[in-house]
Structure formats: structure tokens, C-alpha cells
Image: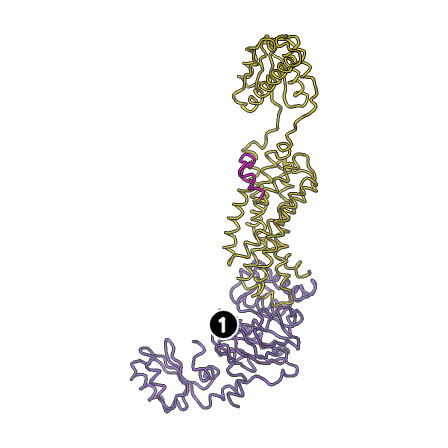
Chain colours: A yellow, B purple
Amino acid sequence: MRAVLILAGKDLRLRLRDRSAVLIAVVIPFTLALIFATVFGGNETPRPFAYAVTDLDRGPVAAAFVDVLDRLAERDIVTVRRVADPAEAAELADGGTIDAAFVLPAGIGTDGTAAIEVIGNVNAPTAADVARSLAAAFVDDLTSVRVAAVAAAGEPHDPRRIAALAERAARFTPPVSVVDVSAQRRILDTRTWFAAAMAVFFLFFTVQFGVSSLIEERAGGTLGRLLAMPVPPGAVLTAKLLTSVLFGASSLAVLIVATTAFMGASWGAPLAVAALAGAAVLAATGVTAVVASLARTAEQAGSWQAVLAMLLGMLGGVFFPIERVPALKALSWATPHGWFLGGLGELAGGGSLREVLPAVAAMCGFAAVTGAVAVVRLRKAVRP
Amino acid sequence: MTLRQLAAPPTSTGTGAVLSCRGLRKSYDGRLAVDGVSFDIGKGETYGLLGPNGAGKTTVISMVVGILPPDAGDIRVAGLPMTLRALAAKSRIGYVPQEIAVYPDLTGRENLRLFARLYGLRAAAARARAEEVLEVVGLSGRAGDRAGTYSGGMQRRLNIGAGLLHRPDLLILDEPTVGVDPQSRNAILDDVTALSGRGVAVLYTTHYMEEAHRLCDRVGIIDAGRLVAQGTQRELTALVGQCDRVRLGATGDLASAGEALERLGSVRGIAVGADGIELLDTDARTALPAILAAVSGAGATVRSVTLEEPDLEAVFLHLTGRSLRD
């Protein structure tokens, strides 16, 4: 163990003196994450959709709709301002003061032809889409109520009864509710996503410095000298793997702290993040060690590792939110990157260590399989 | 002493032998690289392994230092068997590989401290010993500079220094002066002489006859993986008898010239090179006119003639029919 620590200390010292290693380990991933987060909206603070509503009906059905909006406002999902005049509502939407306006025409709920009018702000398409969905959902509910009323009382045209039912339905707490768990859990905010994506992507470049130096030592003759010393052959290989793990873990820790402090990234529960980071470092070390064991020269190893890091990074979703491409999402689970980002997504949804254990286990699985292959192959390398 | 006696392996391990090798054999892909090499080295003795490039010197060294397992044979260092994992035996050896095996991005001082720690010295002792060795190899003034900035000669000296840190019983130097300027070479040879004087056993491989002549108490001549003769320099040169060595710098049809020379009765060994011919002759002074005539008659032109007393190079030529420089 003494020889392992001495050799690992030497390798870490050499790596820290290598400016390119420090650049790749910390400076470049942090800078890229900062740039991407800034360019792609990382500095935005999420805000509620701003809506206006004009109630020209003033009946119970319109009141039920306004009540729906008010309840969303109580949850800070939207803001609602009452506007008396539809023209004023349209003006607010056109001027960008609000994201969308609802105009509730007279006779809504009683007149079969009346419709909720949605005036969207062209610069806020998402908020306008949500407004349209809200209106459509309410209309669907109203239709359901109408059908239910016909079925229950056989009075399809009693508007007062329908209005009363609609009001009651709007206030009624549904016995069954649907919560979109998957969407809530897997969405990292932009800054955290870029920080995590760049960190895990460059991790695969960072850890290669340790393992690949074994090839350099063999070419430079120092491996022969070490093996002629009273140093167990296994100590040399162990030291290389330990160097990769320590250097990778250090760079990841620095990136987590730096992106939290300077970018406002929100990584999640520290213990769970530490578990994810540790597992990612082990997986990256195992994968790069296998590549190093197959290469004949350090240059060859570096090229292959770069290609593999790019490929795994792409499949793992570090270049774009992979949820938008369902076909690739399944492939991302074949990469440590996918599990790492998925685990952080769990934390973003309020998860703790328990929720990230599957991701940790998957990455440890990568590490175990690739590490075993690498050790078997690299043991030959430390024999001349 | 006869050639057979000189080439024969020692009959015992030699009491007190620091290094004892018996019947070492190694093949690579069916090609025999080392074939039955046996020799001993005693305390304070410098043993030279002399042979041309590719003769098997480095393979022998690799087996002796425990980084290459022999296919057959036995190696003992201070009585301890040497294997890949024989850490006790390895701790008795200081190894100076042929290539400069130091870390160019560490300073000279850091390199030596690192190797001292790996040889088992504690931190304080490693620091002190590194300073001593830096002084010995004349690098104290540049100890704080990165080894990669050293000249070739300085790097060679650092390479040697790394093998001295733990005061080994046996120092193994594998062609340590390759690519070194004459001044540094002299310094290295002086260092080796001094170490031998302090009781360190030295195994020194070289293909430079002058180095073996200057340093070695005994010399083993290795060719094509076989130790063809070993003994003191006096014993080895006696094998050549009264032969003189003649070097002919020549151009033209040297192959035909060589064949013509072989037909002369006084010629005992001959090696044809790219720029001349070397031969051993029992009476070169008398035979010189006939030698020159034979070369000219074969279509070659003699540019220079050198006549020398028998030395290790003549021994090699006598034993193998080839020049050390081939």
C-alpha cells in the first residue's frame, strides 16, 4: 500500500503540473457550462404565466372558469388580472404585458354556440399554448357536465341546472388525481443541466490521464525501472487506477462547488450527489482503462478514448436534453452519462439518496465489468 | 587455459557470490535469445558482458533484475532466488537501464527522492540520500531543475544515480554510456570504478571494447545468446595467442577480398565490414605484403592499414568470426 500511495502521489503531482490536464479537468467544462447556460437561458428565473380574463357573462359558468384560474394563481403557476374590456385585454397581450387573455362571452354555458376566446402573446407561445389548453380542458369538463346532467335528469336544456352543476364540479375535489411524476422528476433546471452534462462529459477525458500514463511509462522505460525495484507489480497498476479515481473525483468536486457558487446550479442532496459522482468516476475510470488496455501507444489510447467519450456523451444526452428524442432516451441507459444525469434528475424532483441508488448501482455495474476487463488486460502490461 | 574451459559455466555458485546465474535460457516466439548463460560476480568485482547489439545482453539483464522470467535457469542475488515478485532480492540490486528511465517533468531531486522512497527509505532518509547521490553524480547545481531540461549526459548521470540510492550490493548497468559525450562517459566510468572500489559488485554490459577493457575484472563474451567465453582480460587475450589484429580500410569488392585472405595460411579469423576488413594473423608483419596483394588481386583498393596487439575485440573476432561493430 505504501508503494501505491507513493506512486499515486507522484502521478497526481505530474498531472497537476500538466496545465492541459487541469484545463480539461476543470477550466474548460466550467467555462462551457457557464457559456451554454447563459446563451440558452440559464439566467432566467422561472416566472408564472401572466394571464388576463374578461368576464362578459358574469354567470356561474364563467365564474367557475375564473375560479380555476384563481386556484392556479394561488399555486404561483399563473397570475390573473381582471380586465373589463376585451379590447384592452387584446392590447395587453399585443403589448407583451401579459402572455394571454381569456375572453368569456356572454351566454357561456347556456348558449351552445358561445366559446372562450384566447388572445395569445406571439412572443410567449408556450404560455399561450397553456392558456388554450386550460380553456379547452374547461370546455371539455363543461361538456361532460352537460352529458352527465342529461343522463341524470333528462333535462338537456335547463341552463340553470347545468350552471349549478358546473359550479359544483369546479369546486369539487376530484376523488382521483393525476400527477405527472416522470416529468417532475427528470427535469433539471438549465444551469444545473449544463453544469452536470459538461462535468460528466469531461470526466471521461480527465480520468484517462491516470491509466494512460501506464503506457507512457512503458514506452519511456520507467515501468521497467519500477518493476526492477522492490515494488509489487500490482502496486503500479493499482496506483494508476487510484490516480484516475482521485483526479476524476477532485475535478468533479471542484466543478460541483464552482458551478453551485458561480452559476447557481442546484445539484441536490449532497450525500446523494456524492454517491452519483463517486459512481460516475468509477465507471469512467473503468471504461477508459479498458481502452488503454487495448492501445499500443499513449497517442492511440488518447484518440480512442476521445472518440468513445464523444460517443458515450452523445448517447448519454450531454449535448442536448435527450428527453426530446424518445428513441435516444432508451439508448442513454447504456451509458454512465445517462444514468448520472438521470440520477440528478431524480434529485431535482426532490429525491434523496434512496431515489438515486438505481443510478449509482448501474454506474457501479459499468465500473465492475469494465474494471475487471481492464485489470485482466493491464496486468499483462505491467509484465515486460 | 583453453577456450572450452573459459566458456564452461562455473562448477559452483561461488561462496559469497553476489550474483550467480546458472543455465539461463529465454526464447521469443521460438527464437532462442539467450542460451545457457552462466556466470558469477563476487563482491567488489566488475563483470563485463561484452557483445554486439542484439547479442542478448539486455535479455540477460532483464532476467537478472527480475522483470523477465527465464524459460530455464536459476538466478540468485546474495543467495536469494530472483523471480518477478522477489522483492527481497530486488532490494539488493541497483538497476540502470539502457534507456533514460527518469521522469522528465520531475526535478532531479524529486526523481531521486521518489526512487529512494520506492526502495524503502523513509522520507527524511530519502531526502538526505538524494542530496548525497546528487553530489556523487555531479548534479547538485541543477537538482531543482526538471530532468527534461538536462543535457543527455546529465540525464545519464541522473539515471545512474537512481540506481545508487539504496546502497545496493549489486549494481547493474545496461550500456550506460550510449549516446553520451566523451566527458560524461569518462565521469560515468570513473563513478563505476569508484563504486567497485567500495565493494559493490558490478554487472556492466557494453559493446564498447574500450569500456570493458578499462572497467572490468572479468569479461563474458556473448554472441547470439551464448556466452562464448569468460575470464580475465589476460585469459581471454591468451586465446588469440600471438596473433596480431590487422584492420584494412578498403573499398571495392570486399567480399572477394575476404575470400582471398581466407586462403592465406597465416590468417586465423576474418570479418568483412562495409568499409573494410579486420583479420587476425599469426605473423602480420611478415605476411602484410601478401595480405595487401591478396586484397588488391581480388579487386579491392586498400586505403589504410592498422596493425594492433591482441585485445578484447580481437578475441571476439577470433571466437565468432565477426567484429563487435557488426
B128 versus B308 height, above or below:
above
Q: As drawn, is B53 to the left or to the right of A196?
A: left
A346 versus A303 height, above or below:
above
Nearest the viewer among B282 and A328 is A328
Q: Quadrant of the N terminus of chain A?
A: bottom right
Nearest the viewer among A285 and A94 is A285
Is residue A320 magenta-colored?
yes
Q: Which residue is mark 1?
A: B30
Q: Quadrant of the C terminus of chain A?
A: bottom right
A66 versus A31 height, above or below:
above
Nearest the viewer among B127 and A97 is A97
Nearest the viewer among A142 and A304 is A142
Is residue B6 magenta-colored?
no
Residue A96, percent from left and from top:
55, 19
Q: Residue at x 61, y 59 (%)?
A: A237
| Chain on which label 1 sits | B
Residue A135, percent from left and from top:
59, 18
Magenta-drawn segment: A317-333
* Amino acid, disc 1: Gly
**Based on the displayed image, in which of its 4 quarters is residue B305 positioned?**
bottom left
- Count of marks, rendered view: 1
Residue B55, percent from left and from top:
49, 75
Residue B75, percent from left and from top:
61, 76
10 Å crowding of disc 1: few (<14), some (14-19), many (20+): few
**Based on the displayed image, in which of its 4 quarters is residue B309 positioned?**
bottom left
Which secondary structure, mark 1? loop
